Amino acid sequence: MTVEQRIEAAGTWFLDSGIRFPHGGVARLYRSDLQQNASVSTEITGYAASILLAMYRDSADPRFLAAAESAIDFLIHTAWHKKLEAMPFEHGNGLCPAYFFDTGIVARALLAGFRLTKNERYREAARACCDSMARDFDNGSGFNPVIELPTKRPPTADESRWSLAPGCYQLKAALAWRELWEATGESKYHDLYHTVLEYSLITHVRFLPGSPHEDKIMDRLHAYCYFLEGLLPVAGQLRCADVLRAGVERVARFAERIGPRFLRADVLAQLLCLRLLAGRMGVLALDRQAASAELQAVESFQCLDPAPRRYGGFWFGRKAGTVLPYLNPVTTALSVEALLLGKGPARAN
């Protein structure tokens, strides 16, 4: 199966599997064992919108653009809590908390839509998300990862769960500020990104391994790759380039060690994207053998079962040789990103 056919299959999954709801929101995942979707997630809807836009740019298929705009409209008009000026992390389950990271992913999707369509409404909605991140999550020394709604107060930090504690992974969400600065020229957003950048460069070393349990280390690899992704716009700076190079190799070593027992497909996809992008930037010499192996491993997680709910999506991961029964939009989006980047150099031996 060619890489183009795999991308087409993934696009079919996003469009036709039922992972998207009629209102445009996207489920957190599809449980193949239960044959049902999980709840609608605003973060996952943002990821879906971004990759649908990327597939539209790659193929010019208007169905991808229509699906992306449907997701964006859901985020702006349905998910966004106008009174609280906040983005709850789920829709349809009452008033949920808001996450710094999720709000940033949504803002980035809105800005991707703005860059493609020049729709000012998308940029202003992204500004509202970015302003919420700066206003509601600021704790004086950094940014809280989560706040309760409607109080906007942080819950008690849980250091055992990376998503409930501040960390270097927040840098990927902070890219929304940098991209809004690029879209508006307003320096305050540039400064906000660099505040998180400095914090992340100081704290990232202790993020890994972060746990004695290998399953949790694998989960933290996913988050650590978020940090590395957040470095890409400043990879031309010597300090950031050094951290990016070392980080790619560090993630690869952990994944190789833990992978035979537990492997997340999104970690492989993120690692491959980082390797390819850093290679294109001249930051890291491209290890073609490693990239080719990672690309093949990513492809192995794609479901090619002809059942409409499954075909083309990517499984979340594998434990003890058994595929976990979760078809995941984020995993699929990150894998498609890797496939798009890997059309050429990753396949050249």
Image (spheres, rainbow, N blue to C red):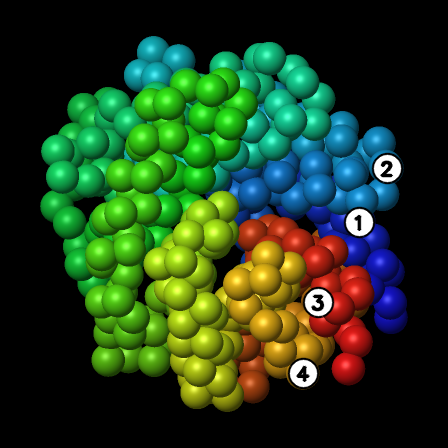
**Which residue is disc 3 drawn over?**
302
Q: Which label belongs to residue 61?
A: 2
Residue 238 at what x, y percent from top left? 40, 58
- Dot 1 and dot 3 residues touching (CB under 8 Å): no
- The Cα–Cα distance between marks 2 and 4, rounded to whole angstroms, is 33 Å
**Which residue is disc 1 drawn over?**
12
- Dot 4 and dot 3 residues touching (CB under 8 Å): no
Residue 312 at what x, y percent from top left? 75, 59
- Dot 2 and dot 3 residues touching (CB under 8 Å): no
Instruction: Kindly state the secondary structure of the residue where label 4 is placed.
Output: helix
Q: Earlier in the sequence, mark 1 or mark 2?
A: 1
- The Cα–Cα distance between marks 1 and 2, rounded to whole angstroms, is 12 Å
**Which residue is disc 4 drawn over?**
289
Labels in figure, total: 4
Residue 333 at what x, y percent from top left? 63, 52
Nearer the viewer's eye, disc 2 or disc 3? Answer: 2
Image height check: is 16 above or below 240? above
Amino acid at dot 2: Asp
Instruction: Kindly state the secondary structure of the residue where label 1 is placed.
Output: helix
Nearer the viewer's eye, disc 4 or disc 3? Answer: 4
Instruction: Report the side of 231 relative to 64 (left or right).
Output: left
Label 3 CA crowd tier, 10 Å (few <14, some 14–19, many 20+): many
Q: Earlier in the sequence, mark 1 or mark 4?
A: 1
